Image: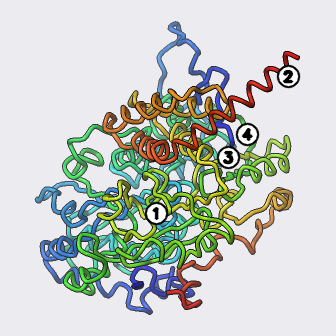
Amino acid sequence: MTEIARFSHGSRVPGWDEPVDLELDPAEVPDPATTDVPDDLREEIEGYMTRYPDRHSAALPALTAAQHRHGWCSPEALEQVACVMRVTPGYLAALATFYDMLRVEPAPPGTHAIYVCTNISCSLNGADALYDAMREAAGDDEAFDVRAFECLGACDIAPMASVDGTYVGPLAPADCVRIVEQCRAGEEVLPERQLARRRAADSVAREAGLK
Amino acid sequence: VSSDLLFEGIDEPGLATLDGYRRRGGYETLPKALRMSRDEVLNELIESELRGRGGAGFSMGKKASFLPKGDMDKYLVCNADESEPGAFKDRELMQKNPHQLIEGLIIAAYAAAVTRAFIFIRGEYAEVADILERAAEEAKEAGYLGERVLNSDHNLILWVHRGAGAYICGEETALLDALEGKRGNPRLKPPFPANQGLYQGPTLINNVETLSNVPHIIAMGAADYVKLGVPNSTGTKVVSVSGNVQRPGNYEVELGISSRELICGLAGGPPAGREIKFWFPGGSSSPVLTADDLDLPYDFDSMAKAGSMLGSGSIIVVDDSNDVLDVALKVAKFYRHESCGKCTPCREGTNWTVKMLERIQRGEATPMDLDIMASVQERIIGHCLCVLGDSMAMPIGSMIAKFREEFEAHMESARDAADRAAIEAAA
């Protein structure tokens, strides 16, 4: 059974047990004059902000974009997003610690996100061994963020994993080394086993005369 | 008994593109709907008796009719945050036939007089979100979205909004908070979203499969649609079958089909030599049923009568090679992880349930613990803002009730093993 990652104080949220420093100045919206935001990132975030009646709605897409650039939701990344969105970095930190896909631990840009589903249907088909094998295959390479993820919505290819957003399965522990190598080489991951190329079970059943 | 509506030719090459969809009559229902009055469309939806496919099973037409009339900012949000363990039907519907959803969404928005719509899709479905975005772009260029849809007086702006990984955002009010750029915490109801939802405006929230049904209802007429399925569970249902079955996948069936036909016929049943021990009829949050219940018809009312629920229509089959304790622990850990922490019974109840189950596993539990655990489940149900806690309490409660002997046997053998280990360590 895969353990949910928790900090030593028992919470999933870092800094949960750190007392507030009452001497600090109140958090402020970063000053555009002194905050350096890359132009393309600013443009992307501003694009998201125009989609919604309230600019706050752009927070999740903006943080995702910043994470893509910085590798994780670093203080610098939060500062940049906060500056464009005109919110405090604290507002964004509250989001980054809530949503699983946003990283609050340092990771280099271009980190490969490998989520191994370890929920019921996948674990009934051997996902826990798959997760262990995937961690072993990635080793201590910090360019890999291997995580036991909750149901990814692909129980038809159990056990499966999402590799940088591409769903592949069914996987065996022996496939993990190849997946990691393909990520390193910048190749497509297990093309023959990508979910996008799989036919619906319904169509197969119809052809087999079951329906 | 099986009929294809949403999954008709689902694997046709190019179906995900506008041309592919139009080639087989796509977007031909939209002009028909726009020629009808908004109330006529609404009436068709009510008379079709279409029940929401996201889990709650509430009448889609009635929900749309609850939105106040008049000129104001109203919203339609398509809930594509499919995260229920065992559910993967929306993924395939969006990936292979995104325009069916968009056409349904435009018609529903017209009926409810909504001018702004969002599809909230879970962040993990990045590939599917790309497909949806392309489809929405195509629809916009073809004049199905934007100002004056097909030269009618109906305007509609649609954006695909990606989440970032949180099961709770599938709960409709938590989804609204997430869409407003906050942590996904459920809201107190009432006010219901139909009165006060996104940005405090009246909001209609529908599941992907529900909206995908809409073009078919308008095309064939409610009178014909109600002939599909059984009374009070009309239409077809895309059912995700997974777990210990030989042919896992999505199957579209008419509601009311026998559960055995679905699990053992279409999905091939458990692997050779194995028997079905228990199954979740509606995702991991539904109370489990056993092999004795396999002959029940698969529809909303039959599942409710059997003490469970159809939910999102996701069957997880567990065979006799598995320990009920392991499955219970998986379920409990999932809900502990996903509890947003706003309500105490859910935040603490899920945590304590995991701790007690682990105690059983380690052999440190006493038989009384099962009763304590059952009472914890009872105290979660109905005491929180949303049903996330209930979603753990109901299946765990049902597992304890139906497999109590197995839990007790496990407890005893684990305790014996722990005792032996202690003696050996002392010696």
**Front-lying residue, B398 or B206:** B398
Q: Which comes before the other along the chain, label 2 or label 1?
A: 1
Residue position for label 4? A107
Tag shown at residue B292: 1
Chain for disc number 2: B
Dot 2, crowdedness within 10 Å: few (<14), some or many (≥20)? few
* Residue ID at (38%, 61%): B310
Callout 4 and callout 1 share a chain: no
**Mark 4 falls on what kind of element?**
loop
* Residue ID at (71%, 30%): B416
Chain for disc number 1: B
Q: How is the image coloured?
A: rainbow
Chain for disc number 3: A
Callout 2 and callout 4 share a chain: no
Residue position for label 2? B424
Residue position for label 3? A148
